[in-house]
């Protein structure tokens, strides 16, 4: 169990925190959104626009379930918690860390919602996603980091202390 798997809402800081955490802990860094893009040979938003949300979700679940790594920090897409089998697979190899930030913080940071590749249905809002996802993040998290107001370095330090 030497992987650290970061989960949380889009724009909560999983990718940037993951890179710094990997450097700090001398682990490799994997961003599952990038793995999906690599496998599909196109950006996330293009997958959603051209193939639909269900196709995207299947592609994401497949990438998560097939991931076999050791000594890595894994930044997942915000919708990773929709797949219990994939989360169980990731938990076998590591600890799930939920980067918790407020809805206000997410809304402040998320200015590219239409191009970012966020798995949300037509007419759905960030608030809808937040309300649906937070209970799932809390359910699956081994560790929750209250990251509102923290710098990347402070967030990393809290994760390091929590995962000793």
Image (cartoon, helix red, strand yellow):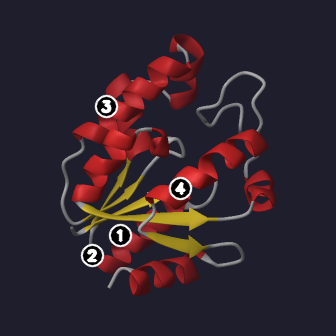
What x and y, as percent, mark residue 96? 39, 63
- Closer to the camera in the image, 87 or 23: 87
Is 118 displayed left or right of 159 in the figure?
Answer: right
Q: Nearer the viewer, mark 4 or mark 1?
A: 4
SS under mark 3: helix
Q: Nearer the viewer, mark 1 or mark 3?
A: 3
SS under mark 1: helix
As displayed, is residue 100 above or below residue 68?
below
Marked residue nearer the N-terminal end (4 or 1): 1
Dot 2, how many residues are within 10 Å of its Cα: few (below 14), some (14-19), or many (20+)?
A: few
* Mark 3–mark 4 distance (CA, rounded to whole Å): 19 Å
Q: Which residue is mark 1?
A: 22
SS under mark 2: loop
- Quadrant of the rendered image containing residue 69: bottom left
* Mark 2–mark 4 distance (CA, rounded to whole Å): 26 Å
Q: Nearer the viewer, mark 3 or mark 4?
A: 4
Marked residue nearer the N-terminal end (2 or 3): 2
* Label drawn at residue 26: 2
Q: Residue at x 63, y 73 (%)?
A: 147
* Mark 2–mark 3 distance (CA, rounded to whole Å): 27 Å
Q: Nearer the viewer, mark 2 or mark 4?
A: 4
* Label drawn at residue 62: 3
Residues at circles 2 and 4 in contact by the CB criterion of under 8 Å: no
Q: Which residue is mark 4?
A: 137
Dot 4, how many residues are within 10 Å of its Cα: few (below 14), some (14-19), or many (20+)?
A: many
Q: Quadrant of the C terminus?
A: bottom left
Residues at circles 1 and 3 in contact by the CB criterion of under 8 Å: no
Residues at circles 2 and 1 in contact by the CB criterion of under 8 Å: yes
């Amino acid at each position: 169990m030497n992987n650290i798997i970061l989960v949380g809402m889009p724009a909560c800081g999983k990718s940037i925190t993951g890179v710094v955490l990997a450097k700090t802990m001398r682990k490799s860094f994997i961003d599952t959104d990038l793995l999906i893009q690599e496998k599909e040979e196109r950006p996330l938003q293009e997958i959603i626009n051209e193939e639909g949300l269900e196709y995207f979700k299947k592609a994401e679940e497949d990438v998560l379930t097939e991931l076999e790594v050791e000594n890595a920090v894994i930044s997942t897409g915000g919708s990773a918690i929709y797949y219990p089998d994939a989360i169980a697979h990731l938990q076998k190899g590591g600890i799930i860390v939920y980067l918790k930030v407020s809805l206000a913080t997410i809304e402040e940071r998320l200015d590219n919602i239409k191009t970012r590749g966020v798995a949300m249905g037509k007419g759905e809002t960030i608030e809808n996603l937040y309300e649906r996802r937070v209970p799932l993040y809390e359910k699956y998290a081994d560790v929750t980091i209250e990251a509102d107001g923290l710098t990347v370095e402070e967030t990393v330090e809290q994760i390091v202390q929590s995962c000793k």
